[in-house]
Image: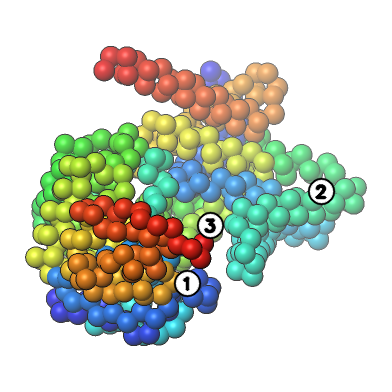
Amino acid sequence: MIDPFLNNGFMQRALLAGILVSLTCAVVGTYVVLRGMAFIGDALAHGVLPGVAMATILGLPTMLGAAVGAVVMIGGVGLITARSKLSNDTAIGLLFIGLLALGVVLVSSSDSLTGDLEAILFGQFLGVDTTDLLVQTIALIAVCAISLYSARPFLLLCFDIDLVSTMGYKAQWYHRLMLLMIAATVVVSFQTVGSLLVFGMLLAPAGVGALLARRIGSMMLWAAGTGVLSTYFGLLASYHFSWAAGASVVLTAVAIFFLTLVFVSIRKSLTSANA
Amino acid sequence: MNSTAVVARRLAVGYGGRAVLTGIDAYLKAGGSTALVGSNGSGKSTLLKTLAGLLPPVSGALEIMGGAVTEMSHKVAYLSQFHPNGFVLPLCAVDVVRMARYDQRGRWARRSQTDDAIVAESMEMMKISNLGDIPLRDLSGGQQQRVYLAQVLARRAGLLLLDEPTAGLDAPGRAAYMEAMVFERERGAAIVTATHDVAEASTCDRVLLVAGRIVADGPPAIVMTPENLLETFGIGLTKVGDHLVVTEHHHDH
């Protein structure tokens, strides 16, 4: 149970990276779940692909490319909804599929990139270095600082966007700040868990929190605990069974979600029966 | 508190520069209550959102409590018609009501004893003191509506803008709401409600019948005539007690 982490430096770094990703995603994922922003989260996770591919072709840092992809996604959604009567969902869907297709075209047109596609989509959990850990730590601190500073307007935003304005806060400003936080989490975390799987770490642990918590703070704690447990047992399974590390971690998180759902349903049935 | 709650001159309200309700000239005083009565799509909710500063006026002039609407929106308590997140959020009923005090506490300050007293009083007015520690998502629709109304009361705002406030409320809930509105008016707050409820409209000082424009404006007993109601709703209606009774269909429809 513990030996793989005691004897292997790469497993220690992977565990630390996973814990940092879990904590970041617990905070951000809580807002994604509560505000029903799963689709924009998914779109951001996929939308970074062309940016990463282009950065790799040009020899630039992949995180820079991912950040550009995220900015194009968020800016594009704003532009389409402002210039047309199309819904947010349609705008997100169009950009999501457009950017994903562009990413696949870029990857397929470059022989050197084909091998990198798997790493972009599914991450390199076991290959994280000190720089990755440092960046992830900075991201976690930034996300916690923003969430603390914006705790009240963010809670109002989750409850009712109209209430934000009548409480004297700028609703659109905080909405954009929340989007930026989601984008930053995706951009920073994709190198560890991959652009596809970071979405799972945003949703599954926060989903567990939503099922169990009675307050938003405790929802974040449940999500963080679920994420950390998933990281530990996912990496352990990956080590013993040679499964892909990122996928193992996300699969564990999703399994915990469904187990929690079953537990909550049974508890509810028993409560109703006893009432 | 400013004695004038709302002053509107030749106001037109709508979305994206397209007016859905025009010709609004209104002077609402503090402590007064006004009901906006009209069919679906007549512009009632749009007017409320404009008064709350959530939509810019299409044209005309609007002052809220003596200031520009954009500067005064935080002095307004607004109850929207829909709360889509009510069944998702992990919040207890008392947390929702406490949110009303955020504008007094700012970003960091903790709740004061005064805040707690106002929250308790507001919940008591809506008869939900016993529901405080129950998650919002475990409450029925009517109970949730009482929580939202308690939140509005806890704002202690100068202007209350309420969109279908009695929707989903049972008879005791309506009675609690009516009593709470009397309290708010005595406190000096002005109240504007959008409603289909004739009984509720009849308790207001003033009724605005709206149908894309102001059809009639005045005390309920004078305004709610069969002719005005025909023009407002497109079908013949007569007020019998607290109910509207359909008497004939409009021949233009």
Horizontally, is A151 left or right of A253 in the view?
left
Out of A191 and A90, give the one closest to the viewer: A90
The residue that appears at 56% across and 29% down in the rendered structure is A254
What number of labels is visible?
3
Out of A46 and B40, give the one closest to the viewer: B40
The residue that appears at 81% across and 61% down in the rendered structure is A58
What amino acid is found at the position of numbered circle 2 in the picture?
Val
The residue that appears at 54% across and 59% down in the rendered structure is A180
Subunit that carries the residue with mark 2: A
As measured in the structure, the alpha-carbon distance from the residue carrying label 2 to the one carrying label 1 is: 46 Å
Quadrant for residue B94, please give it: top left
Horizontally, is A53 left or right of B251 in the view?
right
Residue B4: x and y, percent?
A: 19, 80
Horizontally, is B130 left or right of A190 in the view?
left
Crowding near the residue tagged with mark 2, few <14, some 14–19, many ≥20 C-alpha atoms within 10 Å: some
What residue does disc 2 label? A104
Subunit that carries the residue with mark 3: A
Circle 1 sits in a helix, a strand or a loop, which is it? strand
What amino acid is found at the position of numbered circle 3 in the picture?
Leu
Residue A45: x and y, percent?
A: 64, 48
What residue does disc 1 label? B20
- On residue A179, the disc is 3
Out of A1 and A108, give the one closest to the viewer: A108
Crowding near the residue tagged with mark 3, few <14, some 14–19, many ≥20 C-alpha atoms within 10 Å: many
Crowding near the residue tagged with mark 1, few <14, some 14–19, many ≥20 C-alpha atoms within 10 Å: some
